[in-house]
Amino acid sequence: MLAVVLSAALHATWNFLLRRAGGSNTVLALSKVAEAALLLPIAAVLWRSSGMDLDGRFAMAVTVATGLALANYAALAAAYRRADLSLVYPVARGGVFLFLPLLGFLAFGERPGPRGWLSLALIVGGILLLPLRTLDRGSVREMTRHLRSAAIGLALVAAAATAGYTVWDKYSVGFLNPFLYFYGYTLLLALWFAATLARTPRAEVRGQWRAHPVSIVMIGLLNAGAYYLILLALRDGMATQVLAVRQLSIPIGVGLGWRLLGESLTPSRALGAALITAGCIGAALM
């Protein structure tokens, strides 16, 4: 589980850098293009030395992974057009565990067990506490009303896509080199993001690059490192367990936002972070 914990730290760090850079879609797109460009020499050398053929199975694996990732992006974007980040984000993250245990069981026969289910309950409960303004019934009732909206349905579609590509990743790294699989998926995503940049005003693209060149490169590299570590962990670990422990990135991100960005640490946010941490520790011991 050390690889998953390190992945969570890298994931929280690149999200912190993205927030510090303004969190724009242009910065994110530039980081994906930079990631693919910087890792191309490594992928080329590894491919030549491995002797692996870019056959139909490889193409299928990276195409399905890319499709599921883009479905996640599209559903999240549609949800964010209809509701606030503070509502959509926790549902998209916590909702993964409505789908992943079943998919993990159907694909690999995974069974979390009583301790695993308790850990998942703590993580989901903690995630749902994060956006509450106060720890009272009024805030809970307000959030409950929002849970019946179209935005929440889209957030759950995003969660299902995340669960799907997690299971697909575990399946794919069972017969493919993890780095080459990861790079193929990254390259296809980079091409998609490059197409979005082509439709973005050039002044916006140049302005964001000039303002945040180091952050853009670091976001790309940290994102790559976080994802690759998860692939290594998925080879031998349960998909549900790996993704549960990875939620440690959330309390790390809360801490970074509080200490370095001056974000408020409300009682509900502190309690939510504590529950998620406890759930992650429990999941690591599954």
Image (cartoon, rainbow, N blue to C red):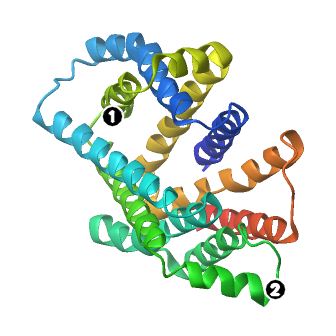
Q: Is residue 59 above or below residue 166?
A: above
Where in the figure is residue 162, as x and y percent of width and height? 41, 56
Residue found 46% across the figure and 61% down from its top: 79
Which callout, 2 or 1, points to the residue nearer the camera?
2
SS state under label 1: helix
Which sits in the foreground, 244 or 33? 33
Q: Residue at x 24, y 46 (%)?
A: 64
- Which disc, if any, is residue 185? 1
Q: Which numbered disc flags the more N-terminal residue, 2 or 1?
A: 2
Image-based side of 207 in relation to 100, left or right: right
Q: Residue at x 86, y 39 (%)?
A: 260
Res. 159 visible in picture: yes
Q: Position of residue 141 (x, y in %)?
A: 68, 87
Give the residue number, with chain letter if any, for mark 2.
136
| Mark 2: secondary structure | loop
Quadrant where the C terminus sits is bottom right
Q: Is residue 111 visible?
A: no
The answer for how far apart the CA atoms under marks 2 and 1 are is: 44 Å
Task: Report the amino acid beneath label 2.
Answer: Asp
Tell which of 254 and 203 is nearer to you: 203
How packed mark 2 is, by other alpha carbons closer than 10 Å (few <14, some 14-19, many 20 or more), is few
Front position in the image: 108 or 248: 248
- Taking 156 as reference, is 168 left or right? left
Residue 159 point in image, percent of width and height: 44, 63
Please report contact status of discs 2 and 1: CB closer than 8 Å, yes or no: no
Q: Position of residue 224 (x, y in %)?
A: 51, 31
Badge 1, how many Cα within 10 Å: few under 14, some, many 20+?
Answer: many
Q: Amino acid at mark 1?
A: Tyr
